Each structure stands twice: as C-alpha cells, then as structure tokens.
Image (spheres, grey):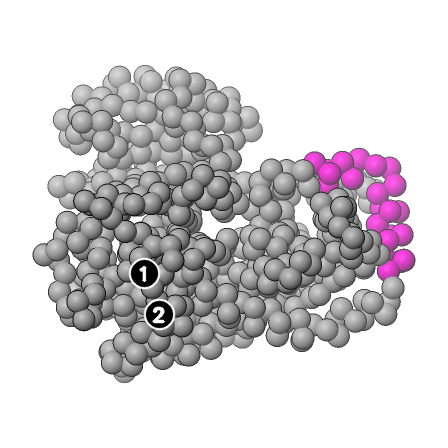
Amino acid sequence: MDNKQKIKTALEKMILSASGWRGIFSSCGNEEDTTDKIDETHRIISAAAAFIFAEYMHSIHASSANSQKVLVLMGTDTRPTGKAIVNAMIPVLLALGCNVQYAGVTAAPEIMAWARKRGSSGTAVGFIYISASHNPIGHNGIKFGLADGGVLAAEETAKLIVNFRSFFEKDDFINKIESLVSSADAVLIRQVYSGCTDAKKEALNAYYDFCGNVAWGDKDSGGAYADSISDIAAVIKANIAKQPLGIVCDFNGSARTVSVDREFFTALGLKFEYINGEPGQIVHRIVPEGESLEPCRLLLEKAHERDASFMLGYVPDCDGDRGNLVIWDDSINKARSLEAQEVFALACVAELSHLVWTGGLSFNNGKPLVKAAITVNDPTSMRVDRIAEAFGVSVFRAEVGEANVVGLARRLREQGYIVRILGEGSAGGNITHPSAVRDPVHTVLAIVKLLALRSNAGKPGLFNIWCERSGQEKKYRDDFTLVDIIASLPQFVSTSAYSESAVLRINTKDHTLLKDRYQKVFLREWEEKKDELKTRYGIYSWEAIAYNGLNEKRNQSRFGEAGKGGLKICLKDGTGREIAYIWMRGSATEPVFRIMADTEDFEKKGRQLEQFLLDWQRRMIVEADK
C-alpha cells in the first residue's frame, strides 16, 4: 500500500465532527499505547488539518487590512502524541503567513479564554487545540475555534470537513504539504517554541480573570446587578472564613495539573488537596465516570477524616473541560460519587438561584419579568425541566455535541433570552455564560456558591431561593448541608451515558434505515405493552422527537427523519405530562451507538422502570439491526 492510500485509509477511520477530529494517533495503532510518536500518515493528516484551518482563517478575515497576519493560538492536553501533532502543524501555519503562539499543555477552557482575550483587542484570532477529550490515551484529535471562546459552530466545522476531505482527493497533496513544511522559516519556528513560557503565562492570566467574570456574573449573564463581581467574591470569601470548606481533586495527570485550579480556589479561602498532579500522570481511565471517580472518593474520605470541612471533590478529563463530582454524604457517613445528570442539575439550581440573588431574574406575581432559558442536549434528564419550571425558565434541547448546545444558546440570546447556564447533562459538567465550554472550575464554584451564599440580613441565600421557588420551604434550614440540597432535587433515575448498558455495537451503517426499522418494531411493541405500561407505571401515550444540530422536531411520524441525530420517545401520563423517555443516537466521536432511559422516580418505581425501558430499548434496536 503506497503512502497516499495509507493516508486515505487512516482518514476513513477518523471521526470528523464539531466535537473534534479524532482517531488513533499512536504510531503502533493501539488505542491504549502511551508512545509519544505518530507515524508519517498522521503527520501528513495533522499538517493538512493546519493547512485547511489557515485557509479558513484567511478567508473569513479577507476584508481585514491584516488578513495575512491572523493569529493562531495552540495548546494540547497531556496525551503523549500531542506535541508530535503540534510539531507537524506549526511549519504549515507559518508557511501560510499565520502568526503562531504555542502554550504547551493547556486546559481547553484556558485556551478558549485566551482566544477570547486576544480577540477582544481586534486581533484576528483562532485556536487549534489538540485533544481527544475522554477517549483512550492512544487516541488524539483536533479542535478548532475562534475568538468567541468556543469550538467552531457545527455548520462552520462542516465546511472545514468538506475542504479537508477534498484536499486528499488531489494527486499532489503530499507534495503540497512537504513543500509548505520545507518553506517555513526556521527562525520563526524557533521563536514559536522559545515563546512557549510567555504564551502559557498569558493564557493562565486570561483564564484566571475570566473564571471570576463567569462565576460571579456580569451584565452579559443577564441583568444589571446590584453587587459588583468583586463584592460577590468578597462575600463568598468572608463566609468561607466563617464556615470553612475543603475541596479535593484527582487531576489524573490532565491538562488541569498546570492550570489555575489551585491558585483560584485557595484565593477564595478554600482548602485544596490533590493527587496525580503531574502532567501526563494518567493512572486510570480518562473519562470521569464510574470507577474513575473512586480514587477521588477515597481521597475525600481521608481528607474529611482529618478535617470535617472537606466536603467536595472533582475529577477532570484529560483536556480539563469537564469534571464530575464526589461529595461527603452525612446521611451515610461516607463519600460517594454523583451521577453526571445529578451534577448538572445541581449546577442549574445554583446558577438560576444566582440569577435571582443578583437581580438578573426577578418576578411579578410569581412570573419572571424577563425571558430566560436553559439549553441542553437531547439526553439531558427531565429533572432539569422540573428545575426550570420552578423559576419560570424555558428549556430548549439540541442534538448531542457541545457546539450544538452553545449554538442554540447563541440563537436564543439573539431572540432576547437570558441563557445563564447550558450544557450536556448526560456527560456532566456545565457551561456558564459568558463561557462557551464546560469547565470543572465553574461546576465546583456553582456548588460553592450554593454552600457559601447563605441567607443574611434579610436577603435569602441561594438554597433558600431554590426552596421557595420549588415549593419546598419546609426543607430549608439555616444549617443545611450539601446533602440537604441534593435531597431537594427533582427525583429521577437516568442511565449513565458511559455505563456498559448504555452502549450498543450495531451493524447497520445507515442510521435512517435503522430508525425506520426501529419504528416498525416500536409500534408493534407499543400495542403489546401499552396496557402493562399504563397499569404498572401510569404511561398512557408517547411522542417521537428528532434532534438534528440545533433543531428539535416534535411529533415525528417517521422516525428515520432523525437520520444520524438523536431520536427520543417521550412517554406521558394521563394528563399528557412527560414522565419518562427512551433515547438513541450513534456517537460522533466513537464507533458506538448509545441508548438511555430517563424516568421520574414516582412511588420509588424509577429504578425499576428505567431498567425495564432500557432493556426494552435494547431489544428493539437489536431486532431493527438484523
């Protein structure tokens, strides 16, 4: 097989989506291999990606007087192959007239805050971030973004993907890349690497400042607040001094090992302890779910035994843009992990209460005086709908993919909505505006605000606000703990997105065909099971909903119209209220098909119904796949 065919074969195995261009980059082709080397095939692919992005940057800034001097910021997570990919890209970017700054190991939210800061001065800025997020260590990937602080919108990524694939259809694509690499100025290349320390310092400073702007809120988050950002931080710091709070972290060798976490949290007066704090010290599975939370849970138990103020812990993924939580649970006298959906629900309670506390969301006769919304992905639990309902806030759903959720939030803001919080509840973590990416710092700070912004001098604290809005005044007490807050959340049972039961391997590559077949199976099964569902679980009717990009299409008469997007079957009670759903979608970042169920935990039947629905969903899809 010649080099061109090898490259095309490798390209066919990659998954190209708005969430990143991902594949196995390790030179031996093993997804669990820890080598720092990539082969010639992936060197050309990486260089070609840089070429396509540079051309894109020049095209969108063609009317600028400085169109030939766009700035491309670069960073990597701690995967071993990251630097080799950067090495392949930098000469191409320079040869095409871009300025380049490389900050080395950088958390995803950090490089995005850096791009936002540099772009605020009018500079034509884009970024390339090397990461495969939660995928195994031998994988890697490429994310692109601009100065708005998020990854490229899905429609813009689609343009790049078309251009990327077309590039490899040209007979001379290898010669084109090699010619660009050889023409790059060696002096400029050395300057990029010698400037790495200064670039990293600049990125950290931009991110540190941005974390405060996001966490405490500003006018962009909705409303002219009575309290300034510094005032809110001061209140939290003063309250933590009176009632200490400790946090632990299992960095797992991620990019957050060299980010702002330690400095930012300790500056608020929070106690902070951590393990696996060296970059690249990846000691367990990267995805922060299930067993990956166990080392942090044990760390929290040890810390709490020494000092009872330690109540919270978090574990980020490799690029540091998401993190799930462990807590000290007073009711069982031990630490336990929280489900991803539970974490997002807590963040929604915190940030909506924060909007009320700061005056960004006010009411007249119980109704909000402004339009406000939460945007989420299609498999986010309906517990978020119940939380939003308590605040008079709307919930809008997009297809899985951070770019889709962020894009939908932007669209709603253009329509006059305040969208303070958004995210993918099924994956954990949250996005707090004006940030455009998930961030464990903001997730942790949401919980800190719930615990530290307490009722004082006649002004209700965040938990008090939530209890009042949700009609749970009796659950509020002045000496509440995190366990009390969690107990006040709407009670739902949801399938974990990363559990074995949520993953299927299917043979049908045409997902439209699969969903059309599934529809026939479902309609037959519904007729057989509708009496049982009504009698045992109070389910009377259903509705099919398709999710493609930013769009939700309800009352689908043909399931196949969901295509490669998400398909949800909402299940309703006798009043037409949605009480459960089953969902399916092929992953855009992994070669798997994901399924899940979500149900209200009425009469403590939630776990039973969730298992029943999940098993039913699996059997129907397997039959449709034959």
Q: Secondary structure at mark 2?
A: helix
Q: Amino acid at mark 1?
A: Thr
Is residue 566 shown left or right of residue 328?
Answer: right
On residue 232, the disc is: 2
Q: Amino acid at mark 2?
A: Ile
On residue 477, the disc is: none
Mark 1–mark 2 CB contact (< 8 Å): yes
Q: Secondary structure at mark 1?
A: helix
3D distance between C-alphas at marks 1 and 2: 9 Å
Quadrant in the rendering for residue 412: top left
Q: Residue at x 58, y 40 (%)?
A: 154
Is residue 305 shown left or right of residue 93?
Answer: left
Q: Which residues are magenta?
A: 162-184
Q: Which residue is mark 1?
A: 358
Q: Residue at x 36, y 61 (%)?
A: 225
Q: Residue at x 82, y 45 (%)?
A: 3
